[in-house]
Image (spheres, grey):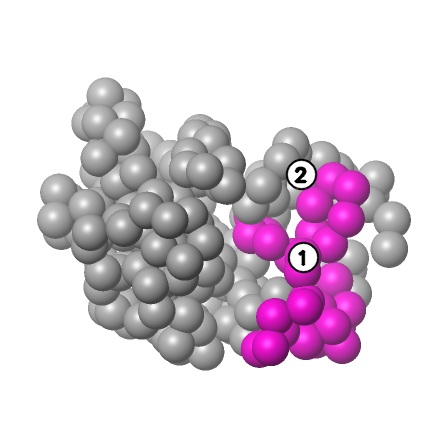
Amino acid sequence: MQIHTFRVGQLETNCYLAIDKNEAVIIDPGDDGDFLSEKILELRVKLKAILTTHGHFDHVLGVAELKLNFKAPFLASRKDLFLLKTARKNALHWTKTDPLLDVPLPDSYLKDGELLAVGGSQLQVLETPGHTPGGISFHLEKEKILLDGDLIFKDGVGRTDFAYSSRPDLEKSIKKILNLPPETKVFPGHGNQFLLGDFTF
């Protein structure tokens, strides 16, 4: 499994393209779907699905362009549907820029423990709420990789000062992922990668 990182948008969101045997999924396509589409075409891979770790606008605004360009299904947590529906409005509020396209509704909803096949690899869906009600992390057990959105970062944890956030849920989610091997490489929604064993909480 190869993980390509693209940092996109005003909030410098990490978008990840996970590739195995010429199949790919894109995780958190930021707000530049056309740029990401070009990268996918350059790499000559088949986009199997568009995934998101949570519904914040800086992680999902590229979904519309990717769906138009590749006809790939969009998968997200049902619990963050309210954020997907208001992503365009929230982007306009926070960035003063209208993204022009609404985020489409998911084609299906992710479930805890679900396995998503990409080439010869499998991403396991882990429900990790707290930052948002529908927070999701994607675990590649064989490769010891965790793509965790805005759950934890190299030097901190995700915000829980939103009305819909939950600090107790965030702490439970962190304890859940800390059961993974310490050599697990964490690919966060913002900032640099790090080893899970180096995270202190």
Asked whether, in this view, residue 87 is left or right of residue 196, the answer is left
Q: Residue furthest top?
A: 42
The answer to which image quadrant residue 25 occupies is top left
Q: Nearer the viewer, residue 188 or 62?
A: 62
The answer to which image quadrant residue 120 occupies is top left
Q: Position of residue 50 (x, y in %)?
A: 31, 52
Which of the marked residues, 1 or 2, is nearer the chain's N terminus?
1
Q: Residue furthest right?
A: 200
Asked whether, in this view, residue 172 is left or right of residue 43, the answer is right
Disc 1 marks a residue whose amino acid type is Gly
Residue drawn at (55%, 45%) of the image: 189
Q: Is residue 158 magenta?
A: yes
Q: Which residue is mark 1?
A: 158
Which contiguous range is marked in magenta?
Answer: 147-174
Q: Secondary structure at mark 2?
A: strand
Disc 2 crowd rating (10 Å Cα; few below 14, some 14-19, many 20+) is many
Q: Nearer the viewer, residue 42 or 9?
A: 9
Residue drawn at (45%, 78%) of the image: 79
Q: Position of residue 8 (x, y in %)?
A: 42, 34
Q: Which residue is mark 2?
A: 185
